[in-house]
Image (cartoon, rainbow, N blue to C red):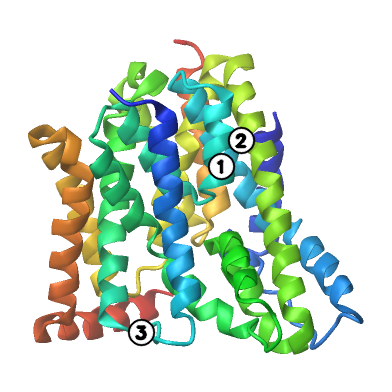
Amino acid sequence: MYSPFVAISLAAIATYAARAAGAYLSGKIGTESAVIDWITCVTYALLAGLVVRMIWMPIGALAATPDWMRFVAAGTGLAVFIIARKSVGVGVLSGSLMLIALTWRSF
Amino acid sequence: MISVEVLSVALHYAVVLPKCSLIMTHTSSPAKPSAFSTPPAAFWGGAREAARVPMMVMGASFVGFGSMIHDLDWSVWHALFSTLSTWALPGQIAMAEMAYTGAPLMAVVLAVGFINARLLPLAVSLLPHVRRPGVAVWTYYAVAMLIAATSWVGTMRRLPDLRQDQRLHYLTGYGLALYLSTPFATVIGYYLAGQVPLPITLALVFLNPLYFMLLFLFDLHNAAKVLSLVFGAVLGPVLYQIAPDWSLIATGLVGGTAAWWIGRSPWGRRLQGAWLKRAVRHD
């Protein structure tokens, strides 16, 4: 097992590499290239997988909550987001409040 | 209770501007051409503009990150070090999740590399606006550290209207104000997680997946992106059962490549056409 500092440092290097490569390439390539489309798609799929996992199979303290509470909270956030005409802030707020309300008595 | 305050301000904006979401809010005020008298004024002007909704949205999500790190029993220094060295939240969260569950370092690096590769096109499209003769090349590599989705959205609309000699100052002020606010938000989130009742800690940790989920569902106009989300959401849990260590990177590569390939095929182009018509009608 490695130390968190190693993972954090490597993640930081990988992230800065993208910024530095962007600085190097700026003015040399267009942003409409197929490679960038592909990177975008891979990122979307990866993060969608991560979001589903964090809601359905969370780690840490959230893992102690029953699945249905997380599903109801996420569903509430989603429903309010749609009703409030795609307002991310209102959706996140109501989803979080729903989780607090559901877990308040049992935790 | 900072995050609750942040969210209530966010709620206020969302109610005042029902048609604009949070990520649209800071693009909605009209740009004033060359509004600054001197380059230092552009620096402080940029910092002031950042210190509104963009900083609140960013702050709320880094509060969530701080809580998450506390929840994983890592130290506050881990949280701070990650925020200051990486400063790109989705990658930080994936890194923490994967490192905590013991994924191989190579998988962590690949996943973070892919997630944060989105910064590359952001830098490529933003930096030509601030380039000018006589400025040392390393300056661009330094200011590249301040490029994130939030700072890109906020500065991109203003830069073309500013005088050439003020743009770098404006971008630096804007980016630096956001950058310097995040370690505070991270530490606040870390200690809130230990001090408040458990349900509030849980909600703070829950903030990030919820925020990302809604952010993704905000822009569904591109068929390839929608397919990526669907494939990713399905493959993520399935592959996690088969190969937990490599599941995230495999989900991204398999789901994303398939979606990208379908999006480029003739069938995908027809789908895009039909999808766009539908999406526009619904808006």
In the rendered structure, which amino acid carries the disc numbered 3? Answer: Glu
Depicted A90 relative to depicted A27: above or below: above
Identify the residue position indicated by label 3 in the image: A32
SS at mark 3 in the image? loop
* Residue situated furthest left in the rendering: B242
Q: Which amino acid does label 2 sit on?
A: Thr
What separation in Å lies between label 3 and label 2 (alpha carbons)? 35 Å
**Does A45 sit left or right of A93 as displayed?**
left
The image quarter in which residue B76 lies: top right
Closer to the eye: label 1 or 3: 1
Nearest the eye: A36 or B236: A36
Cβ atoms under marks 2 and 1 closer than 8 Å: yes
**Residue B200 drawn at (x, y percent):** 56, 23
Q: Which of B144 and A73 is in front in this view?
A: B144
Is B63 drawn above or below residue B44 in the view shown?
above
**Badges 2 and 1, same chain:** yes
Instruction: Provide the chain ID for the residue under circle 1.
Output: B
Q: Where is residue A32 in the image (x, y as percent from the top left)?
A: 35, 84
Q: Position of residue B275 (x, y in %)?
A: 26, 78
Mark 2 element type:
helix
Q: How crowded is mark 2: few (under 14 residues within 10 Å), some or many (20 or more)?
A: many
Residue B203 in view in this figure: no
User: What kind of element bears circle 1?
Assistant: helix
Give the residue pinned by disc 1.
B83
